[in-house]
Image: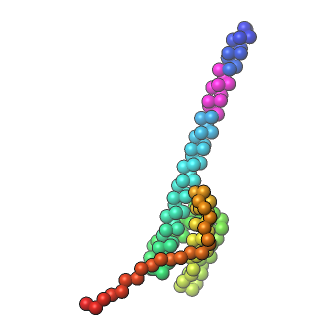
C-alpha cells in the first residue's frame, strides 16, 4: 500500500474517532447539566414551600418539601429534614432554620452566588380584622 494512502486513512480515522468521542462527551455534559438544573429547580421550590410554611399552617407543602429534600437533597439536607420531621412528629412543632440555611447555602454555591449571612428573617404580614 502507498504510505500517503495510509497517512490519509489514519488521519480520517482519527478525525472520525475524535468527532465521535467529542459527541459522546458533549452528550454526557448536556445530560449532567440538565440533571443539575432539574435538581436545583426542585430544591428552590422545596425551599420556597418550606419558607412559606413558617408561622403558617400548610401541611401539604411541608410534606411535599420534606419529600423533595429526601429525594434530591444532599446527605446533610436529608439528615436535617429528617431530624425536623421527627421533632415535628414528636412535639407538634419544630424549627426549619437549619434545613432552610443548608438549602440556601448549597443553592448559592451551585448558582455561584455570593455567600450571605447564615441568619434568616421571615417577613409576614398579618391582617387584622376591622369592626364590621
Looking at the picture, how far across and down is residue 13, in whole percent?
66, 22
Query: Does residue 67 appear left or right of residue 56 in this picture?
Result: right
Say which of 95 and 118 sits in front.
Answer: 118
In the image, is residue 61 part of the stretch drawn in magenta? no
User: Image quadrant for the N terminus?
Assistant: top right
Highlighted magenta segment, given as a residue range = 12-21
Q: Residue at x 65, y 20 (%)?
A: 12
Residue at 64% across, 71% down: 79
Q: Classify residue 119 by image quadrant.
A: bottom right
Residue under the image location 47 percent in, 77 percent down = 123
Task: Identify whether 4 is placed above or below 86.
Answer: above
Q: Quick check: 2 above or below 21?
A: above
Residue 70 placement: quadrant? bottom right
Of residues 39 and 112, the one nearer the viewer is 112
Report whether residue 70 is seen: no
How many labels were placed on the picture?
A: 0
Q: Indicate the position of residue 102 as horizontal and vertical percent values.
A: 61, 68
Amino acid at each position: 500500500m502507498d504510505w500517503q494512502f495510509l497517512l490519509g486513512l489514519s488521519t480520517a480515522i482519527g478525525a472520525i474517532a475524535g468527532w465521535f468521542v467529542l459527541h459522546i462527551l458533549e452528550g454526557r455534559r448536556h445530560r449532567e447539566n440538565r440533571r443539575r438544573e432539574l435538581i436545583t429547580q426542585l430544591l428552590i421550590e422545596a425551599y420556597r414551600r418550606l419558607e412559606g410554611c413558617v408561622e403558617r399552617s400548610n401541611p401539604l407543602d411541608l410534606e411535599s418539601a420534606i419529600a423533595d429534600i429526601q429525594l434530591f437533597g444532599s446527605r446533610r439536607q436529608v439528615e436535617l429534614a429528617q431530624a425536623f420531621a421527627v421533632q415535628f412528629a414528636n412535639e407538634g412543632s419544630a424549627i426549619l432554620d437549619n434545613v432552610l440555611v443548608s438549602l440556601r447555602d448549597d443553592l448559592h454555591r451551585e448558582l455561584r452566588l455570593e455567600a450571605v449571612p447564615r441568619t434568616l428573617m421571615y417577613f409576614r404580614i398579618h391582617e387584622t380584622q376591622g369592626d364590621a
